Each structure stands twice: as structure tokens, then as C-alpha cells.
Image: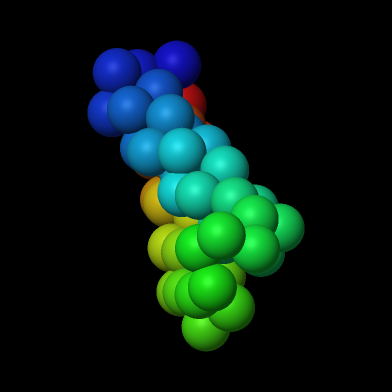
Amino acid sequence: MSLDAFLLGLIGAVWGVLALLYAYMPAFHMPGSTLVWGMGAVLFLGLAGWAHFARR
């Protein structure tokens, strides 16, 4: 795996964790942010997959 794909995957994982925190932590009171962070996670994980397969 290239460094680019690894970093994009790592960013996607962090965004996914943030989406889960916004969804399940009542102290944040930001339910709309869950969709934004979740879609960002999907975008970055998709880019990581694309970068991984483009390298092959």
C-alpha cells in the first residue's frame, strides 16, 4: 500500500470515529454533524481504495 492510500485511509478512519462520537455522545448536541462527518469518512475511505488500486 502506498503512503497516500494509507494516509487517506487513516483520515477516513478518524472522520468515521468523529461521526460516531457526534452520533452517540449527547454532550456534543450536534446530530447534523454526524451526516457531514460520516460522508467525509466515506469520501476519504473511497479515495484510499481508489489510490490503493490505482497503484496496482
Q: Nearer the viewer, residue 1 or 37?
A: 37
**x and y percentages locating residue 36 in the rendered image:** 46, 74
Q: Nearer the viewer, residue 7 or 50?
A: 7
Residue at the (40%, 23%) spot, across then down: 6
Residue at the extreme front: 27
Residue at the (50%, 75%) spot, across then down: 30
Type of colouring: rainbow
**x and y percentages locating residue 48 in the rendered image:** 44, 40
Q: Is residue 49 left or right of residue 20?
A: left
Figure check: 47 above or below 22: above
**Residue 27 seen in this snapshot:** yes
**x and y percentages locating residue 31 in the rendered image:** 58, 78
Quarter of the view holding residue 51: top left
Residue at the (64%, 55%) spot, across then down: 25
**Residue 42 seen in this snapshot:** no
Residue at the extreme bottom: 32
Q: Nearer the viewer, residue 38 or 5?
A: 38
Q: Quadrant of the N terminus?
A: top left
**x and y percentages locating residue 33 in the rendered image:** 47, 74
Figure check: 30 above or below 8: below
Residue at the (43%, 30%) spot, across then down: 10
Image label count: 0
Residue at the extreme left: 4
